[in-house]
Amino acid sequence: MAVEILQNAGPSGIDIAYERFGDPSYPALLLIMGAGAQMISWPDEFCKMLVNQGFQVIRFDSRDTGLTTHFSDTVIPDFAAVMAGDYTTVSYTLSDMAADTIGLMDGLGIESFHLIGASMGGMIAQTIAIEYPFKILSLTSIMSTTGSNSVGQPDYAILGSLGAPPSDDRQKFIEWKIKSLKAVGSPGFPFDEESAIKNAGIGWDRDHDPLGMTRQAVAVLKSGDRTDQLRKLRLPALVIHGTSDKMIDVSGGIATANSIPGAKLVLFEGMGHSLPQPLWEKMTDLISRLILQSEHVDK
């Protein structure tokens, strides 16, 4: 699929890079990826499997990733200060990213759609469902959390051992990326190193903004706990999480499902913070069933 650019999207008037799979007359599924992750982190084959279920699939680069507008001219985030509760170096929040997303779909002429978000993308998807409830037909939150500090915390020992990603050397970045994917990935499933190396190289060539992920990460911290707002949602919801997730502990997924009335929780043994290829068929089937359920809900 060819990458397209929607200009002047949403209240911030940013340019958003996106790709569209499938027949535009089919029900729309919007895929939102996590912090620092570009739309290519949604595997092509995963998208095609959803298309084969009878949907059109849209994936895009969130602000500060890929070919979408970067906020490089804003203040440099002070992560330690933000962790301590000082948000003066935070340039935007998840609500701003949610508004970007609505701007994209409005620009494509899509009035209502299904949401699938992974990691930070799940947090954005939750925020969209909270703030734009009449546009959202169903919500699938994958390896994400509620924003509560009491759940979903990462294994800081593992993250600390990885160090910062190299910002000036393509090969070293690829090596760091593979090390990171192995550290937080899915121990119960094979790791496709060849595909991961290829994807990391493409990612570097599309964008290697060293502070983009940090700007997104502090946006998550400033956005806070969504638990009470999630309890007010009234829509078909699916929560998928791995029992071996070191980036967002499985307690985050459990809390998300417990917060959304009627949400279905599916835990996969051996899945970490990744989308293991052997689970794609099960995941797409679960999503398809959720969407069929949404057709019987009076919006």
Image: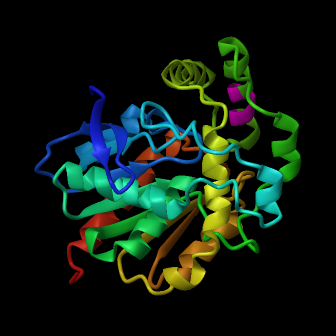
Quadrant showing the C terminus? bottom left
**Where is residue 294 shown, x and y percent of the image?**
27, 73
The residue nearer to you, when weighing 211 against 48, is 211
Part of the protein shown in magenta:
177-181
Prevalent SS, magenta region:
helix
Residue at 76%, 62% in the rendered image: 153
Residue 229 visible, this orientation = yes
- Residue 102 shown left or right of residue 39 in the figure: left
Residue 55 visible, this orientation = no
Residue 266 versus residue 230 in the image, above or below: above
**Where is residue 132 shown, x and y percent of the image?**
34, 72
**Where is residue 121 shown, x and y percent of the image?**
51, 54
Residue 247 versus residue 290 in the image, above or below: above
The residue nearer to you, when weighing 94 against 47, is 94
Residue 27 versus residue 6 in the image, above or below: below
Q: Quadrant of residue 52?
A: top left
